[in-house]
Amino acid sequence: DAGVIQSPRHEVTEMGQEVTLRCKPISGHNSLFWYRQTMMRGLELLIYFNNNVPIDDSGMPEDRFSAKMPNASFSTLKIQPSEPRDSAVYFCASAPSLGSSDYTFGSGTRLTVV
Amino acid sequence: GQQLNQSPQSMFIQEGEDVSMNCTSSSIFNTWLWYKQDPGEGPVLLIALYKAGELTSNGRLTAQFGITRKDSFLNISASIPSDVGIYFCAGRPSGGDSNYQLIWGAGTKLIIKP
């Protein structure tokens, strides 16, 4: 298995633009997590899905952030409109089940909003 | 909310030295995990602990689940250059609605002096 695949690896965008981050989880994993990592705040859980259904989005910082999982092999995290303070590394992780501790992380998307 | 205190924040060591880091929580956890993050990559699971007092090794790495269930430590013996990176503890609190969410420490950055 190729692991969790995220795209793009790097994204530079202007303030106000829409940004879409993509994630393909490991086949057979039923749970998917979106995290944001910054120096100041460390790893923050934004939202997680189980069997394609959003379970908890309380970590999503604002209404500008939205996430979808239309099927078991694809998820998106969208920021519209983007702001400079959204600059961070965004990670997607998947796990066999919600209670599993064996998270597999993607390589992340480094987002820079200028 | 739940927080983990991870220390030290960073370590500068000589190659060949042993390394020790720990995490403490204000509440009881039923799972402790240790992850390592290499530059430009997502965290990778090193060791998972599920029982109080459990001591588990993975090569030169050894981790223990504290008896009080409120702490865990990670030891690395005879460090080598590839041990450089950021080590994260993570845990799952016992009980409550947030059973499925991992709580993350702020990380310990390991640097090996040439």
Image (cartoon, coloured by chain):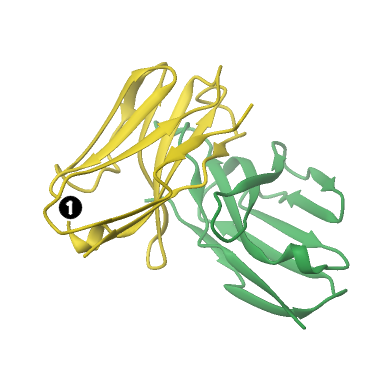
Chain colours: A yellow, B green
Kind of residue sitting beneath label 1: Ser
Q: Residue at x 43, y 35 (%)?
A: A33
Reply above or below: B58 against A72: below
Question: Mark 1 belongs to which subunit?
Answer: A
Q: Is residue B83 above or below residue B113?
A: above
Res. B33 image quadrant: top right
Quarter of the figure that contains the N terminus of chain A: top right
Q: Quadrant of the C terminus of chain A?
A: bottom left
The residue shown at (64%, 64%) is B85
Q: Mark 1 Cα within 10 Å, few/some/many (few <14, many 20+)?
A: many
Q: Is residue B94 above or below residue A81?
A: above
Left or right, A53 with respect to A81, comes to right
Rendering coords of residue B65 (x, y %): 72, 48
Above or below, A27 relative to A13: above
Query: What residue is at 17 percent from the left and 52 percent from the top?
Result: A82
Horizontal and vertical percent position of residue A57: 28, 35
Task: Write down the residue under mark 1.
Answer: A82
- Farthest residue to the bottom: give it: B114
Residue A102 image position (x, y, % from top left): 62, 34
In the image, taking residue A37 as reference, residue B68 lies left or right, namely: right
Q: Is residue B13 left or right of residue A11?
A: right
- Asked which quadrant contains residue B84, the reply is bottom right
